[in-house]
Image (cartoon, helix red, strand yellow):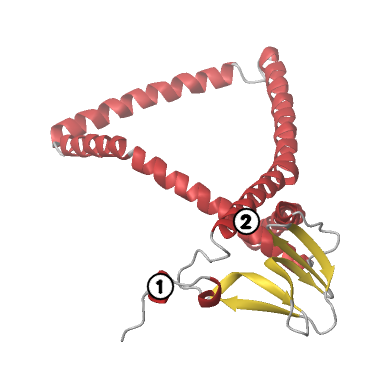
Amino acid sequence: MPKDSKKLNLITTLNTLLVLFAVLTPAVYLIGVHSYQGEMDAYGVSTNTFSISVYETYVYAFYTIGFFINYCANGFVTYLNNAYHLMYVFTLLMLGTAIGLKKVPFKQWLKAKLTDRSNKVLNYFSDLAIKYHWNNHALTAVIAIAILSFYLLISAVLLLALFSILWFHIPGAAYNKTHSNTEAAIAYNSLNNCCPKNEKSKWSSCRTLTSKEGQVIYEGILVAHQGDYVGFYSEKGSFVTQIPSGAQIVTKLKSQQCPSEESEDSSTKPPLN
């Protein structure tokens, strides 16, 4: 019997995990799709031209969920910092209680009192349970059925709410957050001439579509590149175009796009005699 019970518990656990996996997989996929759509809509580029694979969708979902987890963790840490004084007072009270309980006579007296009262309370509730059991009391049976029905109703409502959160609210929040983050990145690149935020980066944030003759066709943020089509965002707007024959997408070095202050100052200094 113990082996059969263990097998039954294992099968039940596996079934629960499979159900959760079946529910969460499409929900995570929707988060990735909405996150990608939020980014592309911020650039003004349609996702019909630049579709992404299932793998890339889950990558978008992974980063989006990671952002929300990080956001919640930071909020929790902030809450703990704000509640530090409460934790400090609680610790002092616990220490004081522990020191007081070290006195043996008080500890034995308290234990005896609690045991005596707990026995009386248990006996009282045991008598009530026997007296008002649904086998002995019709009203209790009616109340039990009503409570069970209410519990099932509430469980169904909570289950629908969970599906609503997974299928609508979280993907919508992913879309809005990715959209706002992309707009902030666009504003930063526009104000800083495509210079990256990371000072250690050696590459510019923008790209250049250059023809085989060396002429610049488009220059700006590379939104997407798929097959023969490419999408750019610049101060003039968004552009989706087919890549001409022989054209190249060039990434400028940070030193070319973002000259340092020292180089600018040295260029303005007069030459030494």
Observer able to see residue 4: no
- 188 displayed left or right of 168: left
Give the quarter of the image for residue 169: top right
- Quarter of the image where the C terminus is located: bottom left
Give the quarter of the image for residue 168: top right
Q: Which element carries disc 1, helix, strand or loop? A: helix
- Quarter of the image where the N terminus is located: bottom right
**Classed neighbour count for the residue bearing mark 2: other residues with Cα under 10 Å, few (<14), some (14–19), many (≥20):** some
Q: CA distance from mark 1 to mark 2?
A: 31 Å
Give the quarter of the image for residue 142: top right
Q: Nearer the viewer, residue 228 or 132?
A: 228
Residue shown at 26%/29% (left/top)? 112
User: Of discs 1 and 2, which sits in the foreground?
Assistant: 1
Q: Nearer the viewer, residue 7 or 66?
A: 66
Q: Residue 188: x percent and y percent?
A: 56, 56
Tally of marks: 2
Residue shown at 63%/48% (left/top)? 180
> Can you tell which mark lies on residue 186?
2
Sequence-wise, the earlier of marks 1 and 2 is 2
The reply to whether dot 1 and dot 2 touch (C-beta < 8 Å) is no
**Classed neighbour count for the residue bearing mark 1: other residues with Cα under 10 Å, few (<14), some (14–19), many (≥20):** few
Taking the view exactly as shown, the residue that stands out farthest to the bottom is 273
Observer able to see residue 119: yes
Q: Residue 149: x percent and y percent?
A: 74, 25
Q: Which element carries disc 2, helix, strand or loop? A: helix
* Amino acid marked by disc 2: Ile
Q: Which residue is mark 1?
A: 268
* Amino acid marked by disc 1: Thr
Is residue 16 depicted above or below 167 in this figure?
Answer: below
> Can you tell which mark lies on residue 5?
none
Residue shown at 18%/35% (left/top)? 96
Q: Residue 41: x percent and y percent?
A: 75, 52
